[in-house]
Amino acid sequence: MFAPKYPQYLHSIETYPPQRLAQIQQRRLRAVLAYASQSLPFYQERFRRAGITPQEIQTVDDLRRLPRITKSDLVAAFRARGYYQIGIEGLGGQQAANVVMTSGTLNFPTFASLAPYELDRGSVRCVMRELWMQGIRPGMKVLVLLPGWHYLSLLESRALTHLGAHCIIPFGTHLSSHADRFIMAAAAARPDYILAFAPMMHALIEGCYAIGRRPQEVFFSVRYVSVVGEPLTPGMRERLKAELELNDVFERGGSSDGLWGGGECEYHRGHHVYADYFLIEVVDPASGNPVPPGELGSIVVTTLSLGKSIYLRFDCEDWGMIVPGPCPCGRTHPVIELHDRLANTLTIAGRQITSQQVRCMLDEIPALVGRPFLIERLPTSSTQLYLHLARVPGQEESDLAIQIERKCRQQLGVSPVLTWHDRMPDGWKGRIVDTARVREGLWARR
Amino acid sequence: MMDLATLVRYSYRRSPFYRRQFASLDRVVVSDATHIPPFRLPDVAAPTAGDPLQGRQTHQPVVIYQLEYEVPVFQGFSHDDLKAYAGVLSDAWHQAGVRAGDRVAIYDYGSSPITYLSSRAICPHLQQGAADRMGAVVICNDGLPELVERWWHLLTYFQPQILFIRCDSMGPFVGLLTRWGGWPAPPPRQVVVSGNEEWPAAREIDGWERALGVAVRRLVRADLAMWLALECPAGRVHVDSERYLIEVVDAQSQMGLPAGEEGVLTITCLFARTAPSIRYISTISGRLCLEACPCGEADPSITLE
């Protein structure tokens, strides 16, 4: 499938020297700022309140004078306007063709508009580079679900078209309850490649065993899988590779709030985020000061192309870090490692713990790889980690508890309090949920 | 479009399924649909590994969609198939009153033709969906009935002028609006309900119209035959005879029935090349109408049960 006639990079810009990329970024940044100040009421107001003009922002460092936008700011604007357009729609003179919704953090899905440019020459080019980087080639059979409401799905659809991939599309959605159709489609069509939501991959493995078939039999034609939706832990990655006998497993990530994303190359150091389309900062969540490469902070994105809703210093409120050093793949665009939502963090005995850390720890125990779990946030401060887990068929809870206890103490420096449940949603993303909501059972219905 | 005889010959030459299907067919009678062996869903369901189309394909498809049936069944498309199929949906949108600049909301899965034919952004290899052709802007919500609260949010802020909703989401949707005391924003001009081989009863439509205070129209589909059609204002479905050949046959004997007698629709799609659908016996019940339709449309019509 990886025929040598295809070059390693889809576009030469992927290996431009950093100085040249910085020049491109600055030129595009100035263009976007000029457009925003002339045409977008939301940003006109923010410039006015910050007391700066776009002309004063000539470099990326100057950009930091512009206050960060948060999801709360967007939600307030949607509520005040009562309409899906709030003055961030940088469509560059085109009409919107598609409107997408986010998945709804803060219990409020926001809206973003996309013009034809975005699907032909905008961020679709980033997705094409990502898919190419991850091994998709013309004529390959790609099994992919494309829900019509999601931004990434629309870009994937166009990128696969431009790349000349053949697509196999199962009926339904990414929920694990639809895994059986996904399995049927894979068994019938024998795809080379799967693009999927990470929790769905676990549901597929469980689904194969449920019908008495080994995953590698059902998915024997599949050589590569690329997942989105949640960061893969080393344990999850290894399990996927082993269960499906894959050549490699890739991850892609980003946010539909902020309309940005990136993907891993074959070195799996993090996500290459294309600097000609996105400007990524990683800042201290409290002070807003930039944190050095290698340190965790909140990801702040500025989109550098028109043809869609644009975001200037949008704080995604996701933990991430700029991975230091050059990437052996030769791409010069920044590598960003994504961790978790800031909201998915709690402090126990003075230590900040993210649910992703807990997931990584649990995934070191083979029986718990990819299993749903929940972290309970108590109303008062606690010195213990309250974990809810789904029972594992054929595994003694006491044996698992000993392993969890040991790893919790070693890796997180706290002791766990475990509650086992007969069933938890397969797609549960390991969120941190307040005690009151846990007791109400609200989490179980999500 | 091909005429029936050409389509039969084309499929016989290129498709293993139709070569078997038409093995005993006399060359002389291929232009007479009633002599052509029909097929049912089980004939093409439960595909063998590596052959999702069960030998129906005449050439390699660029896109394969799994269809919404209880059994696994697939349909394959070329660029031209998608273009023609999206043209059918565009016509339905036009009949539903969609105009340039309209906001259209779709409450269905991305793998439903109502959704994927609406926009080139949703369907790989589709050059223009219905919204692209008509200059409308489209937003989607997954078809899960439990996502109805999200649909409320969409109505509040997006304020669509036309809604397309899956039949099985109508109950939760009407319940939501009843619970909240009506539309959260200006109501749409029209609601269109659709399901694969589903045709809600007229009394159900009346109930929905009363509850919503908005005209509700039915759009019938048979995805395996790539057929979809919007009911006309008189409640009939007109047959686009350029694109489809539709017969009413007896469900048991598979013999053609005269106008006015109830049977099941047997559908031939005249534009699909990649995986032709020739005389698919659907589960949709109806009667051919000979008398002129009160809506004024001249195309032949059927009433569905």
Image (cartoon, grey):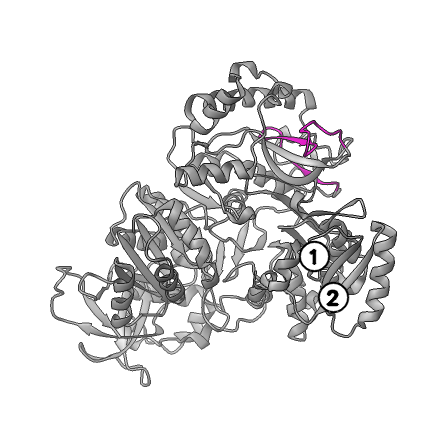
Taking depth in this image into account, of A42 and A359 the one nearest to the observer is A42
> Does A267 sit left or right of A161 as displayed?
right
Q: Is residue B279 above or below residue A135?
A: below
Q: Any magenta on residue A273?
A: yes
Residue range highlighted in magenta: A269-293
In the picture shown, does residue B280 fall above or below B132?
Answer: below
Quarter where residue A266 is shown: top right
Element carrying mark 1: strand
Percent position (x, y) of residue B87? 32, 52
Residue A263 shows up from this direction: yes
Question: Which residue is denoted by mark 2 in the rendering?
Answer: A419
Q: For the point 50% across and 53% down, which residue is it?
A: A147
Q: CA distance from mark 1 to mark 2?
A: 10 Å
Hey, what amino acid is under mark 1? Glu
Return the mark for residue A376. 1
* Residue A218 in picture, x, y percent from top left: 65, 67
Q: Earlier in the sequence, mark 1 or mark 2?
A: 1
Residue B24 falls within the magenta-colored stretch? no
- The residue lying toward the viewer, choosing from A219 and B77, is A219
Kindly report the secondary structure that dominates the magenta region of the rendered protein.
loop
Mark 2: secondary structure: strand
Residue at the location (35% across, 73% down)? Answer: B282
Q: Visible in this render: residue B32?
A: no
Circle 1 crowding by C-alpha within 10 Å: few under 14, some 14–19, many from 20: many
Whether discs 1 and 2 lie on one chain: the answer is yes
Q: Is residue A215 above or below residue A20?
A: below
> Furthest-front residue in view?
A380
Disc 1 sits on a residue from what chain?
A
Q: Amino acid at mark 2?
A: Thr
